[in-house]
Each structure stands twice: as structure tokens, then as C-alpha cells.
């Protein structure tokens, strides 16, 4: 059982003061994305070398007492796979993270074959994390002792893992690479999802404009249902089924039952509402049918295509040399940009804003040699 579960503001203020004197803390969070319409941070875990403390943000609406220490670059914060956590902490509580150390990023830069926290702890320390509560509803109260113990385990071992991975990065001369990646991660934020819902529906590109109108109507109906029930979209009805429904555009419950994968219980539960959404969408005039934005495709350039193939062959060799995944070394989008605007000198690589400094230094000479 963790030493402390904080549920009141005075205790949080005292704990924040304690953290401000630490040189390094391990941090994690639990959210309820599998159970709520709008996910939220439901639990925060902090481990110093001496103890682990859990903070209940559902009992503490104001977490601003943590802001000074979370934004202090002099106090290192160890996360594993920090991207999601940093976005959620800023979105829900305005907490900014500085002084980041991400053990998953370290694993990527070291070419680890498996990057999950459980995989790394098992490999290096023989620690077996029990993931039985990974999909639990962390918004429920009270949390069981077993769930609190599970949550605490995710940060207890991060201090040892950080020391090991940092030493390995130093041996390979990649500490600067990691530092740059950490600084970039500190800037990530959630982006608002505006615009038609069909734009975010996987598989919608295969539908005709009229079918897209039906799909948008079905997605809007589902969004309203999910919001009223406070559940994720997939718990109302899966996107793939709505796409099949939009493709078939059934006008009757009998026709709906014949849609591939559409179970009878779904027809019984939602059939009439779905038919109404389909009917409204089918009544839309053609000029109101939705469409995907036109994509301006680059002009066919055989020379650039040849350069891209050359760069991909070089990347495979370089990745093997570094012992890293090719996509971590440099991604395909960046290689395409380089193939279309081939640099003639190292200084030209500064023109690719998305390229990281460590990539320019480590990969630049090889890129120029491959293109020569």
C-alpha cells in the first residue's frame, strides 16, 4: 500500500513543498479514456527515492500548488511515454512540465526492441508489473487498495531505470540527443478537434459523397449519445459499423439487419434513431454533401523518386549501424522533403525546420554522401 493518498489541499501544499527540495521525482498518471466521453486525469503518482505518494485530482479541483515544482527545470521529472501525460496535465490542470526525462524516448534512442515500461523493467531488473488494472475505470471512488498499489508500482522503479538508461546513453554519446527530444516533448499540447466528424473516421475515404453525408449524420448522432451517456464513442457503436451502415444506406429495419456485422441487438436498441439520422442525411441537397479537402499532390519528379530510394537504402544501413529503428533515426516524411530539395552542403540542412539538431549532426554527412 502506498504511504499516502492525498485528498485535501493543505496536504497537497505540504507535499508540493517537499517535492521542491527533491533533485528528481518520478511521475505518472491514470486517466479514464476507456470509460468517459471526455477523458480526465483521475490519479497522479509521484515517487521520490524515499517514498511514493498518490494525489487524487478528483478530490482536489485545484492542483496549482504543484505548478512551481512541475515547471522547475532544476527538478528532474521521470516519465515513461510522457507525450500523453504532458498533454493531459496541461489540458486538465494547466500544469507545465520542465526538466523532463522520458525513459521510453531513451529506449528508442538505444534501439530497445520492446519499449513498454513492463518490458524494460523485466529486461533490466526482473521486475514483473501486473497490468490487470490497465483498463480499469480510474474515475470510480473509492479506489481499491489493489488499484492504489498497482498505480504506485508504475513510478517506484523509474529512478533505477533512469540511472541505467542514462548511463547507456552516455556510453553511446547520445545524451544530447535525448535532451533535445525531451525539450521538444515538453512543448506538446492537446489540439482541439474541430470540423466534420467524418474527417477523423478511419475508412471514410472509401465512401461516395452521398454516403459521406449519411456517415456524418450517423457520427453526429453517436457523438450526442456518447455525450449524454458519458461514455467513449466506441461504447455506443463502433466506427467500422457506422461506415458499413453509411455504405448500405438502409431505409428500413429489415435492410439494416442485413448490413454486414450489424447485430440484431444493435437494431433493437438504436435502429429507429439510426434510420432517422439516415433519412435526414439522404434529404440533404447535393450541394450540402460533405467532401474531403482536396489534396494538392506534388508534381511527379523521377529524379526525386530516385533520390528517395537512395536515401531509404542509406537509412537502413545507418539504422543498423546505430542499432536503432529506421523510423526513429529519421522518418519517411523528412526523407521525402530532402529528396525533393536535396542539400548540397551541411548548412543547407538548416532549411528543414522539422529536422532535429542531433539528426543534422549525426546524419548530415551521410545524407550528403548518399545524394552525391
Image: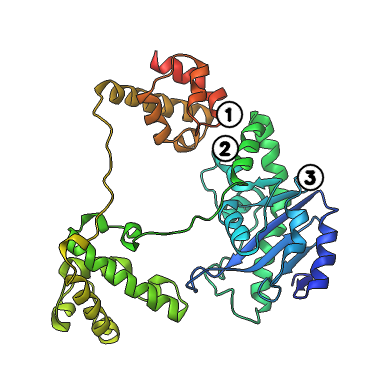
Marks 3 and 2, how far apart at CA: 23 Å
Q: Secondary structure at mark 1?
A: helix
Q: Secondary structure at mark 3?
A: loop
Please give the label number shown on residue 348: none
In the rendered image, the quadrant that contains the N terminus is bottom right
Q: Is residue 282 left or right of residue 131?
A: left
Q: Quadrant of residue 242?
A: bottom left
Question: Where in the figure is residue 346, as x and y percent of width and height?
Answer: 51, 17
Please give the label number shown on residue 358: 1
Seen at 44% across and 81% down, the residue is 229
Please give the label number shown on residue 74: 3
68 or 104: which is nearer to us?
Answer: 68
Would you name the residue on which mark 2 appears?
109
Seen at 85% across and 60% down, the residue is 17
30 or 325: which is nearer to us?
Answer: 30
156 or 180: which is nearer to us?
Answer: 180
Q: Nearer the viewer, mark 3 or mark 2?
A: 3
Q: Is residue 344 above or below residue 173?
A: above
Q: Quadrant of residue 261?
A: bottom left
78 or 349: which is nearer to us?
Answer: 349
Amino acid at each position: 500500500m502506498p504511504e499516502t493518498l492525498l485528498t485535501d489541499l493543505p496536504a497537497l501544499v505540504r507535499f508540493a513543498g517537499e517535492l521542491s527540495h527533491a533533485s528528481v521525482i518520478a511521475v505518472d498518471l491514470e486517466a479514464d479514456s476507456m470509460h468517459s466521453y471526455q477523458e480526465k486525469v483521475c490519479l497522479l503518482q509521484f515517487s521520490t527515492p524515499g517514498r511514493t505518494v498518490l494525489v487524487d485530482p478528483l478530490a482536489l479541483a485545484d492542483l496549482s500548488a504543484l505548478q512551481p515544482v512541475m515547471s522547475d527545470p532544476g527538478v528532474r521529472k521521470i516519465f515513461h511515454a510522457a507525450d500523453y501525460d504532458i498533454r493531459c496535465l496541461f489540458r486538465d490542470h494547466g500544469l507545465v512540465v520542465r526538466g523532463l526525462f522520458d525513459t521510453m524516448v531513451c529506449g528508442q534512442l538505444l534501439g530497445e526492441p520492446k519499449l513498454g515500461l513492463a518490458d524494460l523493467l523485466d529486461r533490466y531488473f526482473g521486475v514483473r508489473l501486473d497490468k490487470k488494472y490497465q483498463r480499469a475505470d480510474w474515475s470510480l471512488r473509492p479506489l481499491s487498495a489493489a488499484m492504489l498499489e498497482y498505480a504506485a508500482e508504475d513510478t517506484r522503479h523509474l529512478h533505477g531505470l533512469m540511472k541505467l538508461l542514462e548511463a547507456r546513453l552516455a556510453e553511446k554519446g547520445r545524451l544530447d540527443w535525448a535532451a533535445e527530444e525531451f525539450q521538444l516533448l515538453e512543448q506538446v499540447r492537446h489540439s482541439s478537434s474541430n470540423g466534420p466528424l467524418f474527417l477523423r473516421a478511419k475508412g471514410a475515404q472509401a465512401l461516395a459523397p452521398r454516403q459521406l453525408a449519411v456517415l456524418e449524420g450517423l457520427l453526429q448522432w453517436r457523438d450526442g449519445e456518447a455525450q449524454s451517456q458519458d461514455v467513449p464513442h466506441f461504447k455506443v457503436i463502433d466506427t467500422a459499423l457506422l461506415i458499413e451502415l453509411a455504405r448500405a444506406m438502409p431505409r428500413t429495419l429489415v435492410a439494416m439487419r442485413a448490413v454486414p456485422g450489424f447485430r440484431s441487438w444493435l437494431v433493437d436498441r438504436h435502429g429507429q434513431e439510426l434510420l432517422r439520422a439516415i433519412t435526414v442525411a439522404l434529404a440533404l441537397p447535393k450541394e450540402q454533401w460533405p467532401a474531403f479537402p482536396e489534396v494538392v499532390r506534388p508534381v511527379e519528379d523521377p529524379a526525386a523518386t530516385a533520390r528517395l530510394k537512395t536515401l531509404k537504402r542509406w537509412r537502413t544501413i545507418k539504422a543498423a549501424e546505430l542499432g536503432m529503428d529506421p523510423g526513429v533515426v529519421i522518418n519517411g516524411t523528412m526523407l521525402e522533403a530532402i529528396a525533393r530539395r536535396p542539400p548540397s552542403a551541411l548548412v543547407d540542412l538548416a532549411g528543414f525546420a522539422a529536422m532535429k539538431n542531433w539528426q543534422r549532426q549525426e546524419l548530415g554527412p551521410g545524407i550528403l554522401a548518399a545524394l552525391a
